[in-house]
Image: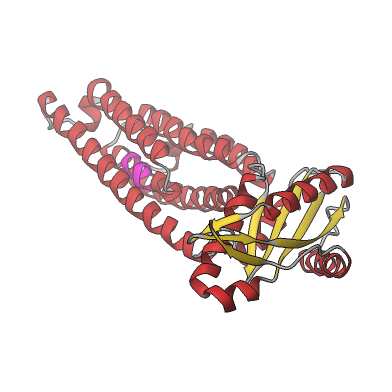
Amino acid sequence: MVGNELMHQRNSVLLLLICVFYFINITINIFIEGVASIFPPAYLFIVLGMLLTIFIYKKVNPKITMYAIVSCVYIYFYFLLKDSPYLVNYIFMWLALPLSAIYQNSRVVVLAGIASTVLTYYAFFYLHDEVFPNVVKGDFAFLVLFGVLVTSLLLFFNYKINEANAKLQKLAYLDPLTGAANRLLLKEKFNFLKTTKINSIALIFIDMNGFKTINDTYGHEMGDQLLEEIAARLTSELRDTDLLCRLGGDEFVILFTNLDSEKLEIVKSRIQHTLEKPMYLNQQVINVSASIGSYFTTDISDAILETMLKEADRAMYRAKGSDLKYESGAVPLT
């Protein structure tokens, strides 16, 4: 979801950096050898650049585009070194490795490291007299070690950055008590779903009945444990594509896709039944119930999250007034 959009942005940034990098490269080549020195690799760059631009503009699968960009970079450098075997072009080739780290993807970094090593082998043994005229062939091992070192450092930094990002994302998108999504993640996934091919969007609004009684009678610690158990039970009823969100207090929202109205009613009944089963916390039997409202639409392009939340909330309050069977309560375990 969010990852795909972020990857698409990084594809765009990397293509821009490659274009800037390319113009720096050809400027140096023109200064050294003249305009004629940049051809025919310039033709290849234009073709590959246009192809990648189309990929980004059409929003082709961002992961495929990512691998296409990295692969095209090394294809270009192969032909560049073949046509203009100079040390400066070989050095520029190594800059593609740290550029690939922009994705914070270990597989891409490893792929770029292997490609850099393969091109180093090609330049060292097939273009040795042009690229490395004063370097003995026994020093090839040091160039390989350099590539392994740079790749390892990039992998380490990627690991640390991804670890830090995961912690920040958890703080930004998840409810710290239940682990359910918060309103921000709900909004981002909702907006993302509107850009995908789905048949319907549905929201279920859940409000626990008598939750305040549990807090007042048994304390907030018991209330927190109850919320954790409720979230766990709700999660067990969801598909991988569904999203559970805690709006606050004892209010939960579930975002569904590709359900028709009949299946939505079945899901609501199943959730109602799951939440009505007794919960055993701190030697107490907690009996709870929930009021559930929903809103369903097949008009994906015009769907508005806040409107759907309000309609599902209203439906929940109607259910609370007419369908409430019993108040929450607790009795000691026997």
Q: Is residue 295 visible?
A: yes
Task: Point out residue 240 in the picture as x, y percentages from the top left corner.
Answer: 63, 42
| 155 to 328, vertically: above or below | above
Task: Point out residue 113 in the picture as x, y percentages from the top left corner.
Answer: 32, 35
Tally the numbered discs. Answer: 0
Q: Which residues are magenta?
A: 93-98
| 118 to 242, vertically: above or below | above
Residue 246 placement, left or right of 27: right
Residue 180 placement, left or right of 198: left
Residue 87 placement, left or right of 328: left
Viewer-side residue, 255 vs 104:
255
Residue 254: image quadrant is: bottom right
Q: Residue furthest bottom?
A: 216
Viewer-side residue, 269 vs 5:
269
User: Which residue is rendered at x = 61% and y = 61% of the image?
Assistant: 286
Residue 122 placement, left or right of 136: right
Q: Residue furthest top?
A: 126
Task: Point out residue 309 in the picture as x, y percentages from the top left corner.
Answer: 78, 66
Residue 150: image quadrant is: top left
Q: How is the image coloured?
A: secondary structure
Q: Residue furthest front?
A: 334
Residue 50: image quadrant is: top right
**Magenta stretch holds residue 283:** no
User: Which residue is rendered at x = 39% and y = 47% of the image?
Assistant: 101
User: Which residue is rendered at x = 80% and y = 68% of the image?
Assistant: 313
Q: Is residue 179 visible?
A: no
Viewer-side residue, 57 vs 90:
57
Per the picture, the main secondary structure of the magenta-coloured stretch is helix
Viewer-side residue, 57 vs 216:
216
User: Which residue is rendered at x = 86% and y = 70% of the image?
Assistant: 321
